[in-house]
Image (cartoon, rainbow, N blue to C red):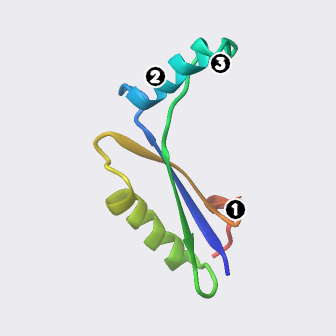
Amino acid sequence: MPTIVVEIMPKAELLDPQGKAVGGALARLGKSQFSSVRIGKRFEVVVDGTVDASTIAEIRELAEDMFSNSVIEDVVEITVDGVAVEAVSA
């Protein structure tokens, strides 16, 4: 069964307080080589059957309308079994 992964991140122009807190903790631990941390969300959706163009369209709609808050977040990537959606044939 194929797995579709949707990755969501806060919009670049917005503050990411969780990422800032983790970045500060890394600095306190002496991990100064890391200059910035941003924290997002990942959804894994297992599909019964095959993934076709209509399945991809439905996942895109869910990603924009349900998985993310379009005011403060961007859908940054959708993959099917590790392959970017654009590379998935319909």
Locate residue 3, reporting x and y percent. 63, 71
Q: Quadrant of residue 64?
A: bottom left
Q: Tell me which residue sits at (66%, 76%) in the image.
A: 2
Vertical arrangement, residue 64 with respect to residue 45, above or below: above
Residue 18 horizontal/vertical position (percent): 43, 31
| Quadrant, the C terminus | bottom right
> What's the residue type where badge 3 is placed?
Phe
Question: Going from the N terminus, do you reach mark 1 or mark 3 first?
Answer: 3
Circle 3: is it few (<14), some (14-19), or many (20+) Cα within 10 Å? few
Q: Residues within 10 Å of mark 1 (few under 14, many from 20)?
A: few
Left or right: where 2 falls relative to 10:
right
Which residue has dot 2 on it? 20
User: Dividing the image into 4 quarters, which one contains the N terminus?
Assistant: bottom right
Query: From where the camera sits, is residue 5 visible?
Result: yes
Where is residue 34, by image quadrant?
A: top right
Circles 2 and 1: CB atoms closer than 8 Å: no
From where the camera sits, is residue 16 visible? no
Residue at mark 3: 34
Residue type, label 1: Ala
Residue receiving disc 1: 87
- In percent of width and height, residue 4 lies at 59, 67
Disc 2 and disc 1: Cα gap in Å?
A: 34 Å
Q: Position of residue 21 (x, y in %)?
A: 46, 23
Distance, label 1 to label 3, CA atoms, is: 32 Å
- Mark 3 residue element: loop
Q: Left or right: where does residue 2 sit relative to residue 76?
A: right
What's the CA distance linking mark 3 and mark 2? 12 Å
